[in-house]
């Protein structure tokens, strides 16, 4: 039920920049003068026009200056729940399990006669990595990174533990929808360099937009689609396209995420732009 896709990049190496592209029709190639990202139609507005009830569950701080873009998108939704109100990432001590717990009652009572579009904005693996998982997920330790410099080992261990916990939370979110007619797209808004830059071997955080090699490392992301058994039964045509694309890799950028979502729900054109050429499944 889980389909994994390779060769996917994000539009930017940071949350604030990336979400502006991922959640609206704003794109890097647009040459319209004096038109800002917030002047473009958002994916939430598109889904509302298509009759979807939109809900935002966020575990990134509502009040942080780094999250102003996500807050603007969230507040377009009919419902939003910010589980961390103030402060930046380093002050957010909520583990992402809070997203599962907070949405459980809502998901359990979804009306199957209505259409729902739900966004989970996770903390994921934002630094400080050791703050992103409970103690029981401390599977990896420094001893397992003996081939790496001593000063890198604790960071690598905590990063991998955060990924382990992140995968666990994503699996629980998918489990919430396993008995519903549901499709789930999972992707990070950006990646991390994690000591892979040969010019800066001690650098591990968000990539610089000014360094092409580092930038390329910072926008590499995983991309997965989960389709529930009921969804697969009711949408065999979509599933055929998903399986085809999984087996035939396509280089794709998540700035075109709105077009993929529109494609999945059967919309052919958005603001005069054909959907399929920009969709991952084309």
Image (cartoon, rainbow, N blue to C red):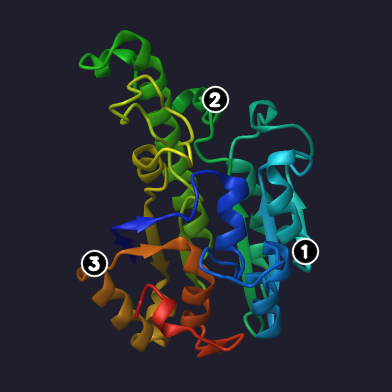
Q: Nearer the viewer, residue 33 or 81?
A: 33
Between disc 2 and disc 1, the foreground one is 2
127 vs 54, nearest the viewer:
127
Q: Report the residue marked by disc 2.
A: 128
Circle 1: is it few (<14), some (14-19), or many (20+) Cα within 10 Å?
Answer: few
Q: Which residue matches tag 1?
A: 79
Q: Could you say where residue 103 lies in the image, as x and y percent from the top left?
A: 66, 55
Badge 2 or badge 1: first in the primary sequence: 1
In this rendering, position of residue 258 left or right of residue 141 = right
Question: Which percent across, then down, holds residue 8?
Answer: 35, 58
**Residue appearing at x 37%, y 48% in the figure:** 220
| Residue 247 quadrant | bottom left
In the rendered view of the protein, which quadrant contains the N terminus? Answer: bottom left
Q: Earlier in the sequence, mark 3 or mark 2?
A: 2
**Mark drawn on residue 249:** 3
Give percent across and percent down for residue 245: 27, 73
Residue 227 is tagged as none
How far apart, in angstroms, are the residues tagged by discs 2 and 1?
30 Å
Q: How many marks?
A: 3
Image quarter in which the C terminus is found: bottom left
Residue under the image location 73 percent in, 69 percent down: 39
Q: Is residue 144 placed above or below 118 in the rendered structure? A: above
Asked which secondary structure carries label 2, the reply is: loop
Secondary structure beneath disc 1? Answer: strand
């Amino acid at each position: 039920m889980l389909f994994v896709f390779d060769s996917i990049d994000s539009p930017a190496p940071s949350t604030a920049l990336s979400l502006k592209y991922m959640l609206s029709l704003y794109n890097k190639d647009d040459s319209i003068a004096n038109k800002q990202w917030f002047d473009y139609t958002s994916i939430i507005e598109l889904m509302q026009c298509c009759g979807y009830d939109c809900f935002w569950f966020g575990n990134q701080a509502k009040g942080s200056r780094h999250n102003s873009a996500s807050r603007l998108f969230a507040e377009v939704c009919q419902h939003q729940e910010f589980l961390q109100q103030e402060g930046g990432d380093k002050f957010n001590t909520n583990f992402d399990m809070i997203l599962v717990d907070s949405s459980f009652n809502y998901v359990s009572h979804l009306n199957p006669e209505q259409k729902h579009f739900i966004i989970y904005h996770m903390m994921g693996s934002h630094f400080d990595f050791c703050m992103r998982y409970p103690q029981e997920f401390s599977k990896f330790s420094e001893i397992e990174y003996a081939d790496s410099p001593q000063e890198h080992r604790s960071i690598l261990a905590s990063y991998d533990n955060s990924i382990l916990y992140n995968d666990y939370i994503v699996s629980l979110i998918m489990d919430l929808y396993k008995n519903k007619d549901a499709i789930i797209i999972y992707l990070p808004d950006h990646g991390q360099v994690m000591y892979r830059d040969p010019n800066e071997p001690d650098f591990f955080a968000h990539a610089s937009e000014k360094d092409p090699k580092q930038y390329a490392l910072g926008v590499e992301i995983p991309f997965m689609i989960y389709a529930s058994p009921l969804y697969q039964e009711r949408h065999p045509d979509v599933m055929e396209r998903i399986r085809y694309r999984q087996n035939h890799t396509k280089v794709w950028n998540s700035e075109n995420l709105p077009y993929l979502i529109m494609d999945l729900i059967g919309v052919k054109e958005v603001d005069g732009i054909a959907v399929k050429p920009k969709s991952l499944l084309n």
